[in-house]
Amino acid sequence: MARKTAHDDPLAPLTVAVGQEDLLLDRAVQQVVAAARAADADTDVRDLTPDRLQPGTLAELTSPSLFAERKVVVVRAAQDLSADTVKDVKAYIASPAEEITLVLLHAGGAKGKGLLDAARKAGAREVACPKMTKPADRLAFVRGEFRTLGRSATPEACQALVDAIGSDLRELASAVAQLGADVEGTVDEAVVGRYYTGRAEASSFTVADRAVEGRAAEALEALRWSLATGVAPVLITSALAQGVRAIGKLSSARGGRPADLARELGMPPWKIDRVRQQMRGWTPDGVAVALRAVAEADAGVKGGGEDPGYALEKAVVAVARAARARG
């Protein structure tokens, strides 16, 4: 899980979440928002990308309110802010406003390091969210997820889960949550085998691969088979999200050899080649539409809708159509 500094008050005036692990970055934001809303249920949350944070925008968002409302301002990909906006942010963190929590998400590295250094100098609460590229890191993550749920799992079960699910932290977290909800007592290797080994990874990613390739009929067939054989719907939405995000990452990346892109994007080289083949029909708008559809399906399978199967079918069709947006 994300590592935190000793200064760990979620309502600190400034939090910086540093790293490139999307799940951990999202959790860092969620923790701050949850703490703010626990203190004030009417907390106003503004979640901004660099293109939406123009010079002067931060001053508007943090200006005193007649109602003295609590506010959380989240700035994603802070390393990509323009020079003028960085000046605004640095000026603000030198003298933050009361009842406002600013959360900066920064990838780390050399780009935008001046802003990160300024935030640290200002005494920011820092949450480290590094990419978990080593199997040992993912194993530790799974163990931590079980502990957070107050559940026990054998070392063999944790290892089997990592082996079955792979490197995606969202899938691993979802799998732990599923096991925690369904299984009584200690989770052992046999339980993991019944749920996931050799089945969930293959079937959920088959659905995703067919969908991002625009093969709607085959994706729907794989989806129905997966659901019929007991694959958790949340694993399918996670696989769809991972597939679409991979398309988006690679389409916006600079050209280069698979090995170079693999290091830049955190993917194995073989996956770079596969995604290149899958992305031919995609457009940036198509990626955005597909991600929204998958997010809606994810909400549906987690209780926001009446029929998880129908929510998944809608998402699969939407992703497949988006894959054919070009041409």
Image: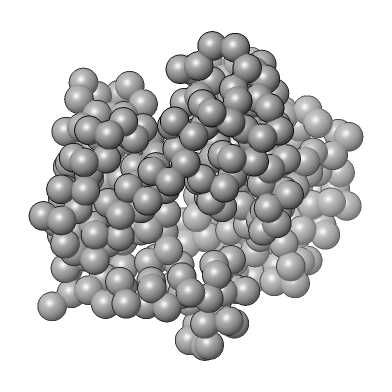
Residue nearer the viewer, 267 or 265: 267
125 displayed left or right of 240:
right
- 112 or 280: which is nearer to us? 280
Residue 232 at what x, y percent from top left? 36, 32
Q: Is residue 225 visible?
A: yes
Q: List x then y, in percent, for residue 23.
A: 56, 44
Does residue 84 sit above or below 15 in this rendering?
Answer: below
The N terminus: image quadrant: top right
Query: What is the x, y in percent for residue 218?
Result: 15, 56
Residue 258: horizontal and vertical position, in percent? 52, 82
Task: Residue 311: name its quadrant.
Answer: top left
- Quadrant position of residue 147: top right
Residue at 59% over, 22% down: 187
The relative height of residue 205 versus residue 35 in the rendered view (above or below) is: below
Residue under the point 17% across and 68% down: 325
Q: Residue at x 55, y 36 (%)?
A: 173
